[in-house]
Structure formats: structure tokens, C-alpha cells
């Protein structure tokens, strides 16, 4: 097999030898200051880096240069994403699963966890609970089971979710995290109006992938790795990739992740919309220490910084798998979306207490959405519930264009302020409302165009009077 970024074959666009060469090259050049300086100079052009260049930065352990990497990541994040953080929540539909993933408690052999699948009535109740928290954007999650969770079931759930309008609530964007499927099924998901199709690679290392997925359809490495090509072929413009850090060594995964992004860009003309950086967590019968590739919090942050520099236009997602402390650090370095108030069990949002019996992983950040919003604003981030882009047709390359042109400040920034205003009026505690109102007032001044500023002010008055869902 030869490395070919444009190939449709997983083993050619994620080529094992190319990854090994890249990791070796990075190790050999990690203290080559002249090379690192030239890579940093290229990165400052904000057009991204190749997997090789980014791998050298990741390997570099020169203290001064590492600080430069962090500073640049922070600056690029500010330039492209400002100080906005988009909020979402996962919604677990079903934990029926026919796969044998060794790191996931939903694996088929786990006979002692209760298996649960939400009825449409239960989906509606979960959605109402999520709307009552203030969420506007969900990521639906399900195990792979063609009998219990066929595509028709997922489509029914999406329909139900979009149909619920409780008080001032609405779910305006449903992202979907379900197993790799066919082009026809991806077309059906597109027609159902999904936002991003998300699928984690888990690991790019084929041999280990096959060991970690010993049974079930997910065992097929190529079918799984080529899923995003089928999704794009099926008309889904926004796809989200990620690896489950801890399963294999991070240098290998990092190179694989960027090669995947390069492949999507080369073949489909647009890279991934988002990259997620989950780490393996304790869960039911899963002990994360059994995978001896865990990485330190420090290296985890460095990975995020290097991703930010390598793919400046790609959103980065961090979930409640991480503690508040790690999230605080990593947000600064390039994360643009976080989950908040999450429950990772099937039916979890309708329970008074956080249930653990069907949880997919232990949640490290267990704060409520109001607490997360409050915390973000105290750290000078604007919590955003915006879902405008895909509803205005700004997906795929059209979103990337907006990002590259710097117009985001006239568009995403005001949208963030208007959706924050909705949250403050409808769902926030008194303290959060007070901080939020002051933040909106201060941030209006940062909208570049006067005309946009004026429109935002008018719309804020209308929101105060009860209107909802304005967007640029
Ligand atoms: N079944 C689908 C699939 O195979 O892609 C949907 C994904 S699953 C509900 C969501 C993700 O959770 C998985 O892709 C995996 O990366 C992650 N996950 C599974 N077990 C985990 C664990 N113990 N700790 C952290 N994340 C885990």
C-alpha cells in the first residue's frame, strides 16, 4: 500500500508506513529549531499545516518553542472564533449494540447493564427537559443495532426532536453520532435536516483497531474509516471526526487524524467541520487503565493547540468527559464547542438524580448548564446557542469561506449575543442573567459594522418583548 491522499481506500489515505515515517521524522527533528521556526512562520499565515509539519510541533519539547506554539494557537482561535463557545448536549437514544468494542460499556457481551431504547414519547420528554435547560443544539447518540436501532428509528427520533416546541424552547440543530452506514442512509439523514454527522475513528491503527473491535460490523476498519467519504457522497456537507485518545499512542493518532482531514479536503474540497478530542473514561465494566496509552493533561492540551494551528478553520469539540479544570485550560487553546449539563445515559435527562446504570462513560464535569454558562462568562467567553449557519445554508465550503473571510465577527458574534439573550431571559439564574446582560452590553461594542450593531440592538429589544430566533 502506498500513501495517496486522494485514494478512496482507507489504507492508502491513512497509510500505516506514512504515519510511522511521520512519527519518526517528528522525533528526529523535534529539536531542530530552524525547522520549527519555519513551520511556525508558515502556521502564522493561518492556512494550516501538513500532518508532518504539525507532528514536528507536537514532538517539540523546547520550552520556549512550546510556549510559542501555545501563544499562536490562542491567537488563531481568537482570530477565527473570537471568544465564543458554542454549547450543546448529547442525547442518548438507545444502548442496544451488536458490537464488541473493548472500551465501551455498551458492548454486546455486557449482560448486566439494562438495555434501553427511548420510545418517541420518551424522546419528547427528554427533549422537553433539554429545552427547559436552555439547549438548542443536540448530538444524538446510539449503539449500532440494525434490529433495535435501524435508520428508520433514528429518523423518527430526529423528526420528534425537531417537532417539540415547549414554551420558548426549540432544538434547532440535531447532530448525529451513529455507526458508519451506507450512502443511502446518509442521504436519508441529510434529508431529515441533520447538522453535522459525527463518527469517531476510535483509533487509526488498523491492527489495534481490529483487536479493539473484535466482533460486530464495526470490526471492519476500512468500512468505518471510509464512512465520511460515503457521508459526503450522500450529500452531508458537515462531518465531524475524532479519535478516542488513550487507545493507541497519541503521536500515531494525531498524524492519522490530520491525514484524514487532508484526505477529505483533497477529495471533497472541504475538510471536517469539527474535530473531537475524547479520552477513554471509566464506565461500568471498563477500566481505562487497561489501555496503557493514556496521556497527561499537559500533552492533551498540546494536542489541542497543534490541531488548532494545523486546521484553523475546523471547529474543535470537548465533552464533559473532561473535568472543569482541563476544560478551562484547553478552551483557551482552540476549542470552539463544549457540551454542558450532559447526561450520558439513556433517558437520563428526565431523572431527578444523575442515573449511572446505563451511562456510557463517567461524566467529569457534572455542573448544570446554567453553571457552565456562568463559568464561561466569568472567564470572558460568550456562551453561544447559535445554530444559524446550517439553517442559512452556510455548510461545507460555504461555512469555510465565511470563516476564511473573517466575516464571522459580523455574523457569528451577533448571533451568539442574541441567542445568549434568549437563554438569559428564558432559563438563567439571577446571577447568570446579571453577568450575561453586562457581557452583551460590552460585546456589542466589538461588532465591527455599525449597521449590524444597530440591528442587533433592535433585535435585543424585540427578544426582550418575547420574539425569538433572530439570526444573521
Ligand atoms: N455506536 C456509534 C459508533 O460506533 O460510532 C455511536 C457512538 S458512541 C454512542 C459515542 C462515542 O463514545 C464512541 O465513538 C466512543 O469514541 C466513545 N466512547 C465509548 N466508550 C467510551 C469510554 N469508556 N470513555 C469515553 N468515551 C467512550
Image (cartoon, helix red, strand yellow):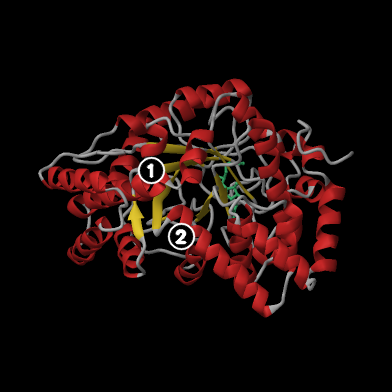
Q: Which of marks 2 and 1 is in front?
A: 2
Residue 334 or residue 204, whichever sits in front: 334
Determine which quarter of the picture holds residue 71.
bottom right
Residue 71 is left or right of residue 462, and the answer is: right
What is the total number of numbered labels drawn onto the structure image?
A: 2
Who comes first in sequence, dot 2 or dot 1?
Answer: 2
Query: Can residue 218 be seen from the camera position used here?
Result: yes
Residue lying furthest right in this view?
Answer: 1
Q: In which quarter of the image is the N terminus?
A: top right
Q: In which quarter of the image is the C terminus?
A: top left
User: Within 8 Å: ligand 1 and the Cβ of disc 2?
Assistant: no
Give the image location of residue 320, x and y in percent.
47, 59
Residue lying furthest top in this view?
Answer: 184
Give the image location of residue 10, x and y in percent.
77, 37
Residue lying furthest left in this view?
Answer: 465
Q: How crowded is mark 2: few (under 14 residues within 10 Å), some or many (20 or more)?
A: some
Write down the residue under mark 1.
Answer: 137
Using the image, tell me which numbered label, if any, was put on residue 78. Answer: 2
Residue drawn at the location 49% of the way across and 50% of the way down = 358
Label 1 residue SS: strand
Amino acid at each position: 500500500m502506498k500513501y495517496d491522499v486522494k485514494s478512496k481506500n482507507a489504507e492508502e489515505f491513512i497509510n500505516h508506513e506514512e504515519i510511522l515515517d511521520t512519527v519518526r521524522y517528528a522525533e528526529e527533528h523535534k529539536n531542530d529549531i530552524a525547522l520549527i521556526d519555519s513551520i511556525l512562520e508558515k502556521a502564522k499565515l493561518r492556512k494550516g499545516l501538513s500532518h508532518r509539519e504539525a507532528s514536528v510541533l507536537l514532538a517539540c519539547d523546547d520550552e520556549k518553542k512550546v510556549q510559542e506554539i501555545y501563544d499562536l494557537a490562542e491567537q488563531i482561535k481568537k482570530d477565527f472564533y473570537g471568544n465564543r463557545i458554542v454549547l450543546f448536549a448529547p442525547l442518548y437514544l438507545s444502548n442496544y449494540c451488536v458490537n464488541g468494542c473493548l472500551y465501551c460499556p455498551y458492548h454486546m457481551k455486557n449482560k448486566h447493564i439494562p438495555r434501553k431504547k427511548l420510545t418517541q414519547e420518551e424522546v419528547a420528554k427528554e427533549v422537553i427537559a433539554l429545552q427547559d435547560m436552555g439547549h438548542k443544539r443536540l448530538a444524538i447518540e446510539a449503539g449500532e443495532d440494525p434490529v433495535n436501532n435501524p435508520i428508520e428509528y433514528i429518523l423518527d427520533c430526529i423528526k420528534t426532536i425537531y417537532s417539540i416546541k415547549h414554551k420558548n424552547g426549540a432544538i434547532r440543530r440535531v447532530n448525529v453520532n451513529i455507526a458508519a452506514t451506507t450512502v443511502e442512509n446518509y442521504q436519508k439523514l441529510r434529508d431529515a435536516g441533520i447538522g453535522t454527522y459525527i463518527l469517531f475513528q476510535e483509533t487509526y491503527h488498523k491492527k489495534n483497531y481490529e483487536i479493539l473491535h473484535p466482533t460486530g460490523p464495526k470490526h471492519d476498519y476500512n468500512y468505518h474509516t471510509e464512512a465520511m467519504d460515503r457521508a459526503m457522497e450522500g450529500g452531508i456537507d458537515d462531518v465531524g471526526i475524532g479519535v478516542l485518545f488513550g487507545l493507541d499512542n497519541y503521536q500515531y493518532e494525531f498524524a492519522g487524524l490530520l491525514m484524514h482531514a487532508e484526505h477529505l479536503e483533497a477529495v471533497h474540497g472541504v475538510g471536517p467541520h469539527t474535530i473531537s478530542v475524547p479520552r477513554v473514561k471509566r464506565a461500568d465494566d471498563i477500566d481505562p487503565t487497561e489501555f496503557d496509552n493514556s496521556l497527561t493533561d499537559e500533552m492533551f492540551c498540546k494536542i489541542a493547540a497543534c490541531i488548532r494551528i494545523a486546521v484553523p478553520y475546523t471547529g474543535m469539540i470537548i465533552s464533559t468527559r473532561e473535568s472543569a479544570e482541563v476544560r478551562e485550560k484547553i478552551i483557551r487553546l482552540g476549542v470552539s464547542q463544549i457540551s454542558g449539563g450532559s447526561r450520558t445515559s439513556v433517558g437520563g435527562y428526565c431523572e431527578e438524580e444523575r442515573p449511572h446504570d446505563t451511562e456510557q462513560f463517567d461524566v467529569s464535569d457534572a455542573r448544570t448548564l446554567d453553571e457552565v454558562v456562568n463559568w464561561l462568562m466569568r472567564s470572558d467567553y460568550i456562551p453561544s446557542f447559535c445554530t444559524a449557519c446550517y439553517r442559512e445554508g452556510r455548510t461545507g465550503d460555504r461555512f469555510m469561506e465565511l470563516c476564511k473571510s473573517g466575516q464571522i465577527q459580523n455574523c457569528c458574534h451577533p448571533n451568539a449575543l442574541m441567542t445568549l439573550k434568549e437563554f438569559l431571559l428564558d432559563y438563567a439564574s439571577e446571577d447568570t442573567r446579571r453577568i450575561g446582560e453586562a457581557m452583551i452590553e460590552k460585546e456589542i461594542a466589538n461588532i465591527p459594522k455599525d449597521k449590524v450593531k444597530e440591528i442587533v440592538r433592535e433585535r435585543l429589544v424585540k427578544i426582550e418583548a418575547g420574539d425569538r430566533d433572530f439570526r444573521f
